[in-house]
Image (cartoon, grey):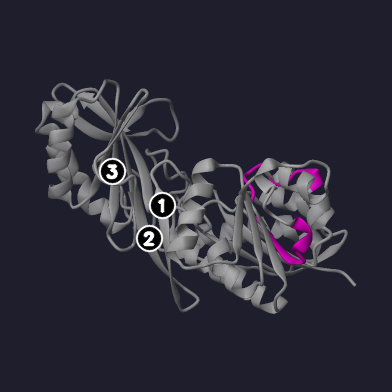
Amino acid sequence: MKCEHFGTCGSCSVYELSYKEELAEKKERVLGLLSPFDVKDLEVFSASDANYRARSEFKIWHEGDEAFYAMSKLTEKGAFNIVECPKVIKPIEKRMQPLLDKINGSEVLKHRLFAVEFLATTTDECLITMIYHRKLESDWESEAKELEKLLSAKIMGRSRKQKVVLSDEFVTEKLLIDVQEYLYRHYESGFTQPNPVVNVQMIEWAIKQAKKVQGGDFLESYCGLGNFTIPLSKYFTKVLATEISKRSIYAAKENCELNSITNIEFIRLASEEMTQALNKEREFTRLKDVDLDSYAFSTVLVDPPRAGLDIDTIKLISNIENIIYISCNPETLARDLVGLTQTHKIMQSAIFDQFPHTHHIESGVFLTKKN
């Protein structure tokens, strides 16, 4: 990726290496962490090194009467003005300058605007959230509606204790996964995978592992909006998926309906609560209509935050025959594998480069129970 802000912008912390060199470094780093568990090699899923990110946030910097997009600096405190961001996908990139031009041409749109967030899809839907340090009145709504028409985008406004939705607060992504089309409703305030192309590769890798299992029931913790759950449900009899976020559970249920899937039960539970429920240590009103005893889990998928899994969850999933572990932090993955490899053996492992030009890397391991 060519960007005139490489080395200055804090968004891309790896800029001195070619993308091939960067990917080789990431593979070597993860392989070093997994080699104590008899991992000899990793399947590598790379990204495009430009136009790969489907969501992005920019500060708005005001100098005199003009507003600019701004980002944090890489090596020191403070922000600086940017003129391009080639990492965002084309539906965002093509709207950035026209949006800024309209902001600078309108005191109503510009006044006390301090940030803009973009959320887009591979099919050219785009949701733009404009965030202010002031209350938004009817004059803002009127101009923002005109902006929607000009940009062919959805516009939202936010300020303290105020949210103004002009049309929708979501976009609907359409992804071809394992030769089948899936729809995902992505909400402005919800978590979504940032790199659509690598996300598909990641889901298809998980499906490849699920196909080896040949049925049974499926358990998922940290299911989000159903990113993995929905396409993987095709390969299991019944699915129980849990997530702590109300917004994500709401979106997951909507996405289930969008894809006409009927074998998934989405429940709002934290990972620790899921463990307590399945171990019958505690009863939850949210589970009053769910017969936990009716599930015979052959496979579990976990996709925890950077902190990794808690000890009780590790103990719980150690009783399940097959484990798919997706990790956004290879250090905590390696830590958790110390416990999991007491009962399971790693059969497949991979890395997924969702975040080119940064040190972040997603990893995946597939484990089966030892005889």
Tell me which numbered mark, 2 or 3, is placed earlier along the sequence. Answer: 3
Q: How would you rate the neighbour count of disc 3 (Cα within 10 Å): few for under 14, some for 14-19, many for 20 or more?
A: many
Tell me which numbered mark, 2 or 1, is placed earlier along the sequence. Answer: 2
Q: Residue at position x 18%, y 53% from top?
A: 152
The spot of residue 291 in percent (x, y) is: 73, 57
Q: Nearer the viewer, residue 159 or 112?
A: 159
Q: Secondary structure at mark 1?
A: strand
Location of the N terminus (image quadrant): bottom left
Residue 47 is at least partly visible in this image:
no
Q: Secondary structure at mark 3?
A: strand
Q: Is residue 266 above or below residue 98?
A: below
Residue 225 is at least partly visible in this image:
yes
Question: Which residue is denoted by mark 2 in the rendering?
Answer: 173
Q: Which residues are magenta?
A: 292-312
The spot of residue 345 in percent (x, y) is: 81, 67
Whether label 2 touches label 1, CB < 8 Å: yes
Q: Nearer the viewer, residue 113 or 242?
A: 242
Question: Which residue is denoted by mark 3 in the rendering?
Answer: 128
Location of the C terminus (image quadrant): bottom right
Question: Which residue is denoted by mark 1 in the rendering?
Answer: 186
Q: Residue at position x 54%, y 68% from top?
A: 231
